[in-house]
Image (cartoon, helix red, strand yellow):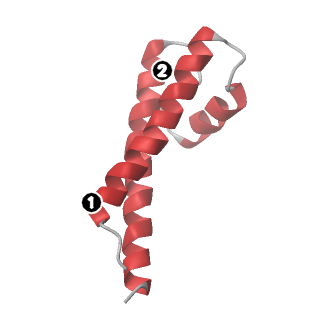
């Protein structure tokens, strides 16, 4: 069985982007929530800083959407190659 490249790419991008968005929004409400996770993301994504601001959350979410989509596309492509 093969994976749909488009569907898996979209799903991974939305899940990873949504995760960063939810932790970032929770951090705006409760400043101590998810600090280590957001600092990890800021060490990976250039230009993103783990500041408790809406702009920072949106930048991190954008990076995570793209990163998750690329990772999902690579995973689905490799899986489909191995599933032949």
- Mark nearest the camera among 1 and 2 is 1
Percent across and percent down for residue 43 are: 61, 38
Percent across and percent down for residue 3 are: 35, 70
Residue that carries the numbered disc 2 in the rendered image: 56
Whether residue 43 is visible here, answered yes or no, is yes
Q: Residue furthest front?
A: 1
Which image quarter is the C terminus in? bottom left
Q: Is residue 30 left or right of residue 46?
A: right
Q: Is residue 23 left or right of residue 33?
A: left
- Looking at the rendered structure, the secondary structure element under dot 1 is helix
- Looking at the rendered structure, the secondary structure element under dot 2 is helix
Q: On screen, 55 above or below 4? A: above
Residue that carries the numbered disc 1 in the rendered image: 6
Query: Which residue is rendered at x = 58% and y = 27% of the image?
Result: 23
Count all numbered tags in the image, as a single digit: 2
Q: How crowded is mark 2: few (under 14 residues within 10 Å), some or many (20 or more)?
A: some
Q: In this view, does 79 lie to the left or right of 20?
A: left
Which quarter of the figure has residue 70? bottom left
N-terminal-most mark, 1 or 2: 1
Percent across and percent down for residue 63 are: 42, 38
Query: Which residue is rendered at x = 35% and y = 77% of the image?
Result: 2
Label ID, residue 34? none
Task: Please say if the residues under marks 1 and 2 sit with CB atoms less than 8 Å apart.
Answer: no
Query: Which residue is rendered at x = 55% and y = 23% of the image?
Result: 24
Q: On screen, 5 above or below 32? A: below
Q: Residue furthest bottom?
A: 84
Q: Residues within 10 Å of mark 1 (few under 14, many from 20)?
A: few
Q: Distance between the residues labelled 1 and 2?
A: 28 Å
Whether residue 49 is visible here, answered yes or no, is no
Which image quarter is the N terminus in? bottom left
Relative depth, front residue between 83 and 40: 83
């Amino acid at each position: 069985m093969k994976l749909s490249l488009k569907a898996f790419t979209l799903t991974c991008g939305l899940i990873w982007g949504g995760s960063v968005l939810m932790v970032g929004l929770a951090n705006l409400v409760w400043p101590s929530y998810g600090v280590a996770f957001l600092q990890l993301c800021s060490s990976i994504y250039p230009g993103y800083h783990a500041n408790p601001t809406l702009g920072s959350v949106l930048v991190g979410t954008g990076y995570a959407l793209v990163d998750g989509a690329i990772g999902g596309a690579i995973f689905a492509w490799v899986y489909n190659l191995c599933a032949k």
